[in-house]
Amino acid sequence: MCGIAGVYSERFSAVEKVYYALFSLQHRGQESAGIAFYSDTIRYKKQMGLVSEVFTKEDLIPAKYAIGHVRYSTTGLSRLENAQPFVVKSKIGTIAVAHNGNLVNHAELRRELENEGSVFTSDSDSEIIAQLLSKILLKEGDYRDYLQELNSKLVGSHSCVLLINDRILAYRDPLGFRPLCVGELEDGYIVCSESCAIDALEGRFIKDVEPGEAVIMDNGNLEFIRFAKSRRKAVCIFEYIYFARPDSIIDGINVYRARTEMGRVLAEESPADADFVSAVPDSGITAAIGFSSRSGLPYMECLIKNRYIGRTFIMPKQELRELLVKLKVNVIKENVRDKRIVLVDDSIVRATTSKRIVDMIRKAGAKEIHLRVGSPPIIAPCYFGIDMKTRKELVASNHTIEEIREIIGSDSLSYLSLQGLLKALERVGGKDFCVACLTGRYPVAVPGELAEER
């Protein structure tokens, strides 16, 4: 998923502002962090770890232009060589690239570039964008021409923030898989993955970058250009289900309201006879509040989260995910003993976390546990930036709902229907989503799959 940000600051505080923006986007990636900035030339620092672990006060060097990245790996291993931004030198100067997304044709592009003499330092698809740009920018033309040529070669999701010498160029791919928005700061501008980063810097939200649109920050000037058009959008529906922060607004949709509506529709579709509604924290809380509101059942916490443990789904290894589940939540035994509980979670991917949590609540004395899921079953791999690459790791791809219930150990299990999910998002003004992981129908051709238009 990754988080990206770019800042122009008239007062030379761009690095500091990107640093704080990355704090706000830390939920989008916890493996590595990096910042590139322009000061006579492009310099950068990137390391494995959280933003607070990677940077010190001494790293916040004065600069007018800076971009940053927090990584969650999909293509490329979780190691320093794949940390971003990627910085390459070319005849036109130095280019730094921060990429949110996943290229489905990265292997083909890499072979072509290597045959032309490009040397790669990583196995990340994001470095391909940097290498392509270093060649495209040598040609005659303007940024619209460059982005049109770049877009003609890339297949998949690619929202990017680029630092090209002393200029920031950010764009969103023509289907708009991944979010990107622009805000005005007291002394400049910011472009970032989610509006919560603009709020953290006390900025003013200007607009979402539209699919096929780019924004240029050049010496205090802000310019929007259109480089591509698409017949439709395919915004990742998982942004609203799980990944985005609830206080963000993406493409005009308040994420908190969207998740509340998902919970309300879930209660309409799958009511339960229970004593109270609870949530798997944190991403299930908002849907649980919606379920409680619609069902009339009180909302009560039964799980307390350790705030110092990261998001287990985006951890890179299954063994680590299983260990961290034990450390991540604890049961409030007095609240669950002899109670019938509706437990709401945002999604079930591998069922590892759900099984362990249900087992914990059962051992704490719960009488009944009715698991309700605020999204439909995930049946197909994602090739556009979520770490769900094979069907064998998706529990719903290989088991019926009743079989999943038995694996997890709940007394009942119900998912929000696809129709219900789309209804909930339509209620808050949303439409045109990528639902490939829920249907198996992909908006672009992907390796080994039959691409269909939904």
Image: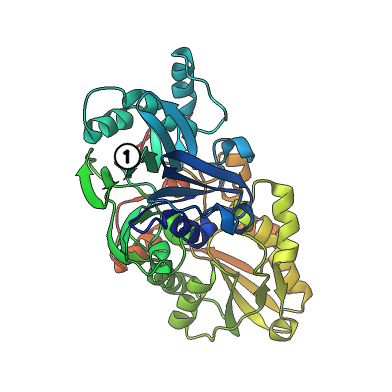
Query: Quadrant of residue 77 in the image?
Result: top right
Q: Is residue 405 visible?
A: yes
326 vs 306, nearest the viewer: 306
Query: Considering the numbered disc 1 on the image, is that residue within a helix, a strand or a loop?
Result: loop
Q: Name the residue tied to disc 1.
A: 453
In the rendered image of this protein, does residue 33 appear above or below residue 442?
below
- Name above or below for residue 453 compared with residue 419: above
Q: Where is residue 249 drawn, in percent x and y? A: 36, 64
Percent position of residue 197, x then y: 42, 62
Crowdedness near tag 1: few (<14), some (14–19) or many (≥20) residues, C-alpha within 10 Å: few
Nearest the camera: 297 or 253? Answer: 253
In the depicted structure, whether residue 36 falls above or below residue 148: below
Q: Using the image as rendered, state which of residue 437 and residue 368 is in the foreground.
A: 437
Q: The C terminus appears in which quarter of the rendering?
A: top left
The residue positioned 49% from the left and 81% from the top of the image is: 292
Amino acid at the residue labelled 1: Glu
Res 375 visible: no
Give the image location of residue 314, x and y in percent.
Answer: 59, 52
- Answer with left or right where residue 71 lies relative to residue 438: right
Identified at 70% across, 48% down, the residue is 318
Residue 139 in the image: above or below residue 186: above
Taking depth in this image into account, of 286 and 3 the one nearest to the observer is 3
| 247 on left or right of 123 | left
